Structures are given as structure tokens and as C-alpha cells.
Image: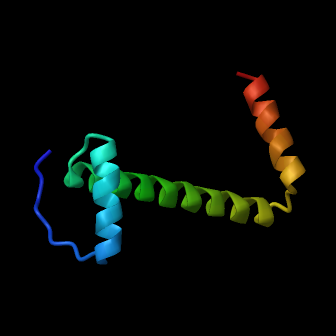
């Protein structure tokens, strides 16, 4: 994958903390930032999926108990 260089502004204390973590994990600053961004994006996608699921459950008048039961039924059929 081709990489691009960007400029990023961070408060001094945040950069200091990031550098400490990078050093402890034997990573470069760039590796640490890439991993942090990957995790942020993954969390955002999961949150989006959860919100979609809640909206669909609401449209179908399903309670959390109904959703859990339906998930269990589908898993049992596999």
C-alpha cells in the first residue's frame, strides 16, 4: 500500500504521552498513530452497525430480549 505523509498538530503533552507509549511498545511514532487510527475507525464502524441494528429493532418493535433470542435461534440453526 502506498503511504502518504501528512502533517498532524497535537498538543505537546499528548505527543509526549504518545512517544512514551510508542517507546514502550517498540513502535515508531507513525506506527502508533496508524494503529490508533485503525482502532478508531474500527470502533466507529462498530458503533454505526450497532446504531443500525437498534434502529431496525425499533422499526420491528423488537426488545433487546427478542433480539438476543433471534440471534440464539439463528446460531443454533448453523
Q: Identify the image quadrant of residue 72.
A: top right
Q: Nearer the viewer, residue 30 or 26?
A: 26
Number of numbered tags placed on the structure image: 0
Residue shown at 77%/38% (left/top)?
A: 71
Q: Nearer the viewer, residue 21 or 61?
A: 21
Q: Nearer the viewer, residue 51 or 61?
A: 51
Is residue 29 depicted above or below 7 in this figure?
above
Q: Identify the image quadrant of residue 77.
A: top right
Residue 12 rendering spot, x and y as whole percentages: 28, 75
Residue 53 rendering spot, x and y as whole percentages: 68, 57
Residue 31 rendering spot, x and y as whole percentages: 24, 48
Residue shown at 29%/67% (left/top)?
A: 15
Is residue 23 left or right of 68 when viewed as pictured? left
Is residue 3 depicted above or below 72 in this figure?
below
Quadrant the N terminus occupies? top left
Residue shown at 29%/50% (left/top)?
A: 22
Is residue 51 left or right of 71 when viewed as pictured? left
Residue 27 rendering spot, x and y as whole percentages: 25, 44
Is residue 68 depicted above or below 9 in this figure?
above
Is residue 61 depicted above or below 26 in this figure?
below
Quadrant the C terminus occupies? top right
Residue shown at 86%/40% (left/top)?
A: 69
Is residue 8 left or right of 52 when viewed as pictured? left
Amino acid at each position: 500500500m502506498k503511504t502518504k505523509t501528512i502533517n498532524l498538530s497535537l498538543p505537546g503533552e499528548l505527543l509526549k504521552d504518545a512517544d512514551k507509549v510508542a517507546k514502550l511498545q517498540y513502535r515508531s511514532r507513525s506506527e502508533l498513530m496508524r494503529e490508533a487510527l485503525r482502532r478508531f475507525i474500527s470502533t466507529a464502524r462498530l458503533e454505526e452497525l450497532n446504531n443500525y441494528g437498534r434502529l431496525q429493532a425499533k422499526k420491528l418493535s423488537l426488545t433487546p430480549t427478542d433480539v438476543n433470542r433471534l440471534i440464539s435461534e439463528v446460531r443454533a440453526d448453523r
